[in-house]
């Protein structure tokens, strides 16, 4: 048995690698710029990066923290026209613009000169200030407005790649520079910028885009995402670090631990009650096939199974949490809005939370009754028809002993197969039920992450669900051998 477990774990390793690669590819190709989201969240929340209050410094800080200042993977298939250091560009829009320029012209040295010149011209505009004597002649507010427009147009050049747009911006900048005579100091930098762009267009090397080149990187984003960076910013996925939330900027692992408790509680509660009730019903229905009990239980359970969970949840709320009908139970949450009193003990907390648990627990459990009982019934009917069951009955054994001792264990294999899906469900939770009853679990957190494009949380749930699915399969295999002596793993 131990040898079999060891082999299965070894087989899981490639699957886990594929799962992590899938999650990583989704996170890398997700729309939007995580750096911009982090910086925007810090500004809207009144926060300032610990590195510097400067916007550029904040972007650089978050790029390092998120590992975006590294190449994506160990190996990259590129062309000879592309440099192997393009990943160091901190601004995503600027990097995309450089990618497009390389794809159009293929001459990276000239494109690099043009890109550097845009930075030089923008820095010159930042440092530019007219003399005090010149300011006396003209309107200060108009001069300030022109300078701001120049800075905006020059900065936007760095994230622009279309020729007509770049030419239009050059014309706008030229017109602004000619509006006041003291802007003549900036004319040499502007002429150098235009000349460098003209060089890019006249010295194209598009053929370089068709010559492949392999680039290898020892340190990359996938390695840091998986193994961490030594604890400076990340401990890595293998150490339980799923990254930082784009919404709250908290570690994803902390968010999961704070949410998973209620999801596990309702999952375990539904599993225990569903199996305790469903298995005896299924066994009795199979033992008395065609009887009134079989027909009645089938009808009732079929009706329960046919009711959508969101419909039943709404019906329960409208009936038992409605001041106009029966206001017996609270409508949402898992505890009083004011929280638990500081002096209350464990059983006191259970007593306070019990009214909040009843309605969602019913919605969690009811659909499993029909599903599990029908599986148990079909499996039991098939087992009861076997020759060894007829032999046991021919020997005069009591019917209860024939059913529960000889037929029951061999009928559990389909139930065990279903039980393997319990592990991933414990992480994902019930999105619909948790959202309707406002349960602070993983299901509602998944919905919140999707609505807010919180990709690290989505990837964490995906990765954990895949891992627990493998654990469920392994656990099911072990239970097969326990309940059925005919199955052995050697």
Image (spheres, rainbow, N blue to C red):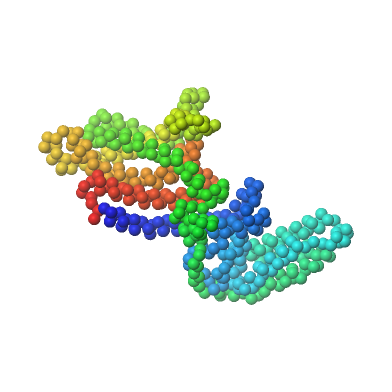
The residue located at (69%, 61%) in the rendering is: 155
The residue located at (43%, 45%) in the rendering is: 427
Write down the quadrant of residue 302 in the picture: top left
Closer to the camera in the image, 424 or 389: 424
Closer to the camera in the image, 421 or 6: 6
Q: Position of residue 100 (x, y in %)?
A: 59, 66
Q: Quadrant of the C terminus?
A: bottom left
- Whether residue 346 is visible, yes or no, is yes
- Side (left or right) of 477 relative to 27: left
- Side (left or right) of 232 relative to 284: right
Q: Position of residue 344 (x, y in %)?
A: 48, 30
**Against 470, is 318 above or below?**
above
Q: How many marks?
A: 0
Write down the quadrant of residue 10 in the picture: bottom left
Residue extending furthest toward the front? 343
**Against 92, is 109 above or below?**
below
- Side (left or right) of 119 relative to 379: right
- Whether residue 384 is visible, yes or no, is no
Closer to the camera in the image, 43 or 99: 43
Residue extending furthest toward the left? 395
The residue located at (23%, 41%) in the rendering is: 409
The residue located at (18%, 37%) in the rendering is: 402
**Against 389, is 112 above or below?**
below
Q: Position of residue 74 (x, y in %)?
A: 48, 66
Q: Position of residue 84 (x, y in %)?
A: 55, 69
Write down the quadrant of residue 260 in the picture: top left
């Amino acid at each position: 048995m131990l040898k079999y477990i060891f082999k299965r774990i070894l087989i899981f390793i490639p699957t886990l690698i594929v799962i992590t690669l899938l999650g990583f590819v989704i996170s890398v190709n997700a729309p939007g710029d995580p750096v911009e989201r982090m910086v925007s969240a810090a500004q809207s929340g009144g926060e300032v990066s610990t590195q510097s209050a400067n916007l550029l410094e904040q972007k650089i800080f978050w790029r390092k923290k998120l590992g975006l200042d590294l190449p994506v993977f160990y190996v990259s298939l590129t062309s000879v026209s592309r440099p192997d250091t393009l990943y160091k560009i901190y601004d995503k829009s600027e990097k995309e613009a450089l990618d497009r320029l390389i794809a159009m012209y293929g001459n990276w040295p000239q494109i690099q000169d043009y890109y550097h010149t845009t930075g030089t011209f923008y820095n010159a505009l930042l440092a530019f200030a007219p003399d005090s004597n010149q300011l006396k002649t003209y309107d200060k507010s108009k001069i300030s407005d022109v300078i701001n427009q120049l800075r905006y147009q020059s900065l936007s050049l760095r994230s622009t790649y279309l020729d007509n747009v770049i030419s239009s911006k050059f014309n706008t900048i030229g017109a602004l520079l000619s509006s006041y005579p003291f802007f003549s100091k900036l004319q040499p930098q502007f002429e150098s910028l235009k000349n460098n762009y003209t060089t890019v267009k006249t010295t194209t090397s598009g053929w370089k885009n068709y010559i492949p080149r392999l680039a290898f990187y020892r340190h990359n984003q996938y390695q840091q995402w998986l193994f961490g960076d030594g604890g400076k910013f990340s401990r890595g996925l293998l150490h339980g670090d799923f990254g930082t939330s784009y919404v709250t900027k908290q570690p994803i692992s902390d968010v999961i631990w704070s949410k998973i408790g209620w999801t596990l509680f309702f999952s375990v509660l539904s599993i225990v009650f569903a199996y305790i009730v469903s298995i005896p019903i299924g066994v009795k229905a199979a033992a008395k096939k065609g009887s009134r009990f079989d027909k009645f239980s089938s009808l009732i359970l079929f009706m329960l199974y046919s009711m959508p969970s969101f419909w039943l949840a709404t019906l329960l709320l409208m009936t038992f949490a409605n001041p106009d009908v029966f206001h017996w139970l609270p409508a949402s949450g898992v505890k009083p809005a004011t929280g638990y009193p500081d002096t209350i003990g464990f059983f006191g907390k259970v007593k306070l939370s019990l009214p909040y648990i009843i309605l969602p627990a019913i919605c969690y459990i009811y659909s499993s009754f029909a599903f599990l009982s029908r599986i148990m019934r079909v499996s039991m009917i098939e087992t009861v028809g076997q020759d060894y069951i007829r032999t046991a009955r021919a020997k005069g054994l009591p019917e209860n002993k024939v059913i529960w001792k000889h037929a029951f264990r061999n009928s559990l294999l389909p139930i065990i197969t279903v039980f393997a899906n319990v592990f991933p469900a414990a992480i994902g939770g019930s999105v619909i039920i948790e959202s309707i009853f406002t349960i602070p679990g993983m299901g509602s957190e998944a919905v919140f992450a999707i609505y807010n494009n919180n990709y690290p949380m989505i990837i964490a749930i995906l990765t954990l669900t895949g891992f627990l699915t493998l654990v469920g399969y392994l656990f099911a295999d072990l239970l097969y051998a326990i309940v059925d002596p005919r199955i052995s793993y050697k």
